Image: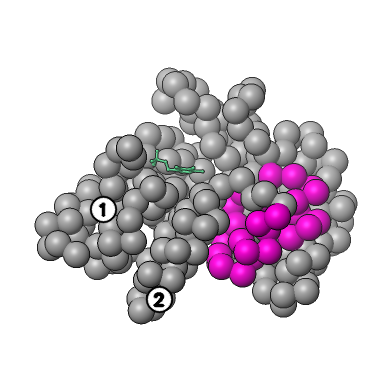
Amino acid sequence: MTANLADDIADRLQKIEHKIAQSMTQLDQQAQHRPVRLVAVTKTFSAEIVRAAYAAGIRDFAENKVQEGIAKRLALSDLTGITWHFIGAVQSNKSRKVLENFDWIHSVDSLKLAKRLNQQAQELKRCPTCCLQVKLALDPTKSGFEPDELLAALPELSQLTDLKIAGLMAIAPYGLAASQTQTVFERGRDLAQQVSQVAQQQGWQSVHMNELSMGMSGDFEEAIAAGATLVRIGSGLFGQRS
Ligand SMILES: *Cc1c(COP(=O)(O)O)cnc(C)c1O
């Protein structure tokens, strides 16, 4: 690892953390807000870059491909205290490996996948923290629950007691104005509140809505303004992916 690489990442990290802090000051002063967790998205970047980011103090890393993530985990098994996040589409033949190798799954995008993960989590006695991925705007390229579909699936989701459902994840469509992006993320916040109310009314212990995984390098400030608790930052820390 070159010292320069770690320094570059540390510089970028400091700037992003500053922006995160700024965005949080805009939030309603009345409300109690938890610190926003920065998850570094290292897909396509080498294990050495992850090591440099670790040296800069980052402990949350996200990957979107199972094999790539496992390879980096193995290459970095000497580093302690890392939380590994999975943020990509979970193919059904890879779901077991995702459960075995990641601490969080942000991309639970269908009832079918949730059921499969629940079954396998029970078998493996391993229960990562899960976010339900939701589609908050018309965007044919994104997967996830439509809001209505999510509400309709809640009774079944509430039965999946081997899954730790912690909140929602969303990706905003590309190319919107900042204010429109923020409106999209606010829809995510409102949906989480709605789900949380239903869960409370029904007495479901297994569905929690404390986490909102929203915001990437280009829109994390809008996401934080809408209440994001985790932001997923790749290019802003590591540069453009080739
Ligand atoms: C790649 C990716 C990110 C990070 O995107 P950047 O724009 O590089 O910050 C965040 N979330 C998901 C789901 C991704 O696939």
Q: Mark 2 or mark 1: which comes first in sequence?
A: 1
Disc 2 marks which residue?
A: 77
SS class of the residue under badge 2? loop
Image: magenta residue range: 93-117
Up the image or down, 45 lies above or below 58; here it is above
Q: Mark 2 is on which residue type?
A: Ser
Up the image or down, 131 lies above or below 235; here it is below
Horizontally, residue 79 falls left or right of residue 169, namely: left
The image position of residue 157, as x and y in percent, is: 81, 54
Horizontally, residue 30 falls left or right of residue 221, namely: right
Horizontally, residue 159 falls left or right of residue 66, namely: right
Ligand 1 placement by image quarter: top left
Q: How is the image coloured?
A: one colour
Mark in the foreground, 2 or 1? 2
Residue 97 highlighted magenta (yes or no): yes
Disc 1 marks which residue?
A: 13
SS class of the residue under badge 1? helix
The image position of residue 151, as x and y in percent, is: 80, 41
